[in-house]
Amino acid sequence: MSISMALFSPPISSSLRNPYLSPKNSLSLLSVTRASSDNGASTTDSAAVSATTVEIPKPASVTVEEVPSKSPAESSSDETDLPTTETGIKFEDAKWVNGTWDLKQFEKDGKTDWDSIIVAEAKRRKWLEDNPETTTNAEPVLFDTSIIPWWAWMKRYHLPEAELLNGRAAMIGFFMAYFVDSLTGVGLVDQMGNFFCKTLLFVAVAGVLFIRKNEDLDKLKGLIEETTLYDKQWQAAWKEPESSSSTVSSKK
Amino acid sequence: MSTFALKSFTGLRQSPTDQITFVSHVPSSLSRSQRRTSLRVTASRASPKLANRSLRVAVIGGGPAGGAAAETLAQGGIETILIERKMDNCKPCGGAIPLCMVGEFNLPLDIIDRRVTKMKMISPSNIAVDIGRTLKEHEYIGMVRREVLDQYLRERAEKSGATVINGLFLKMDLPEEWDSPYVLHYTEYDGKTGATGQKKTMEVDAVIGADGANSRVAKSIGAGDYDYAIAFQERIRIPDDKMTYYEDLAEMYVGDDVSPDFYGWVFPKCDHVAVGTGTVTHKGDIKKFQLATRNRAKDKILGGKIIRVEAHPIPEHPRPRRLSKRVALVGDAAGYVTKCSGEGIYFAAKSGRMCAEAIVEGSQNGKKMIDESDLRKYLEKWDKTYLPTYRVLDVLQKVFYRSNPAREAFVEMCGDEYVQKMTFDSYLYKRVAPGSPLEDLKLAVNTIGSVFRANALRREIEKLNV
């Protein structure tokens, strides 16, 4: 199944996303500078907005009205105008109407095709991640993912994953049972009565649930340290002077 | 056990010598409460009375923490000196204070420039959620100008009897004997000697360090370092018709483009808006994040003029040592800024007050010398009252600011009325209100649902990338 294939592919973790940050932001920077050079370019937005932009002077350095006093860190003393025109890049889709998906356009055989709505929303979010857009009061985004019923989500995401994990657990279970039987001669029914075997079973199930990729092991260790770190930082004031001389700092 | 041995000693030996054995070297194997009760019982009784004078305490730093501490000290009959380096300092700050601060500190209502009663939270995919429907008529988040608030609290401290000095604290000589004073070295600016000021020294019995995130007092006592976030803010004056939208509304933007571990904001100030963002882990990219924040709010701040750019560090957690002998840290100097929301003004003022109260109590209104155990009472009270709040906000930040799906789920959940009510109750009144268990259960189910849906959509996005 295509979804299970996707699950095998390496995850694009949030740390990897950061290399995307520079191209993303340089894109928005480009669009900003393009806007400032398009003086008074017509936009698809409401007329009221473009009317007020005409009065404001163009983005060049203006005479300094206020000289702010020196602030502790950075401070600049010119007045800078913000770009006064719209950029052309916007998310547009025939089925995206008034800030939400028009459910009527997603019908298939008389019933709403929830899967295609999910895919459409994913496409929209991916677009926005790559091209962050301004929010406007004229076209607020009102879509709420909870309108898609829970069973549609289950069918698309939970069930395939559950099938995969159960399959893994079954295979591990069968071979472990065979292995233990061949080593100790204890049959399956007798294994279930033994405390050690029950512990092994619990560990196997937990392992299948929590460790799905190689990186998960390190991630779990990091998580445990992360949950206790804040408490440690607060309790540092109560420790002995000798031990608190080594500062408790987090390793990010 | 050493505690029993010490107890028998107090009957036989003279008071001053007892003190020295107590304060240090209590075995850490003792539970905290045990340790503290043994310290509490004997220390204050053993402190010597001060002959012919009141206790002298210096408060370094005249922000909310310093002002509140100085006022409480002065009202308690203690000789208080407040040292502030810049009397008209416009500290770069969000400027939001909770409702309870107005009541607890008797702030006059004209200090508050704006009353924010509506908030908008905007997710990475620009789904906007309105928060504030559950607020009652008299409830609001107050927006203040720091220069106005700080000046007011300092004036009140002065009226109560504190001496306010315009000076820059340089360093502090720690006492050699247990009853020697602290010698403060500072530069006094009094207008007559010009901009460079005059070097002076002062002897005091105790010091409250309220000098902010880059505290010199903290350095003097070796308090240790903390992780900090950089908050970067631009003040933008926008056209009047756009300003009416922000009349009583503040916005919070979340997303990887705006900040990897914090949020971007648009807060209304007296006659302009402050647009800013912050980060802990990617401080070098802060300008990019600021541009992204401005981009997200672009339509609403169109045609605005940037009138000021400012940045400041925000501590992420308390310093390892918040006090040492008779020096205590309060406010930002101690690191009392919450995670998730980055709120610091109220906690600064409250910690200043609490520390001062502990000093007043421990010295019996300035008649006796205090010692570290009196200051530890302040730490104890503070941790007991506010640690749950800090913990909850830390968990919220860890869970909901990790990734874009988490933020989408966060924004979705903030649309729920129960969440809004609980959030505002705990923010405005600083108490963890007990909600109804049934609603809590529904909330838990909804949270899991939101997080599941957001992560499912992310998996879908990853499939599209492949």
Image (cartoon, rainbow, N blue to C red):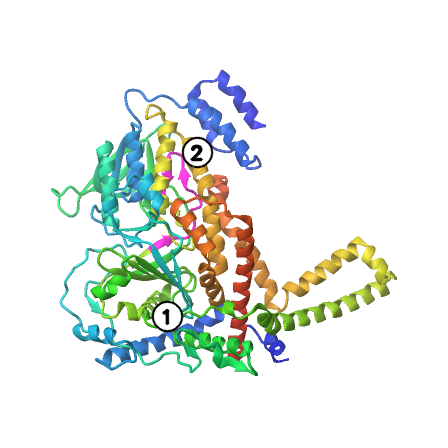
Q: Which residue is pictured at 46% across the width and 57% down the height?
A: B397
Q: Which residue is pictured at 49% across the width and 57% down the height?
A: B398
What residue is pinned by disc 2?
B377
Q: Say if residue A12 shows up in the picture.
A: no
Q: What residue type is labelled 2?
A: Lys
- Looking at the picture, do discs 2 and 1 lie on one chain? no
Residue B457 locus on image (x, y percent): 52, 72
Residue B76 locus on image (x, y percent): 31, 29
What residue is pinned by disc 1?
A140
Alpha-carbon distance for marks 2 and 1? 51 Å
Label pair 2/1, CB-CB below 8 angstroms? no
In the image, residue B403 above or below residue B59 = below
B47 or B290, nearer to the observer: B290
Residue A186 locus on image (x, y percent): 86, 60
Q: Residue furthest top?
A: B12
Boundaries of the magenta span: B313-330
Label 1 CA crowd tier, 10 Å (few <14, some 14–19, many 20+): some
Q: Which amino acid does label 1 sit on?
A: Pro
The chain identifier of the residue carrying mark 2 reads B
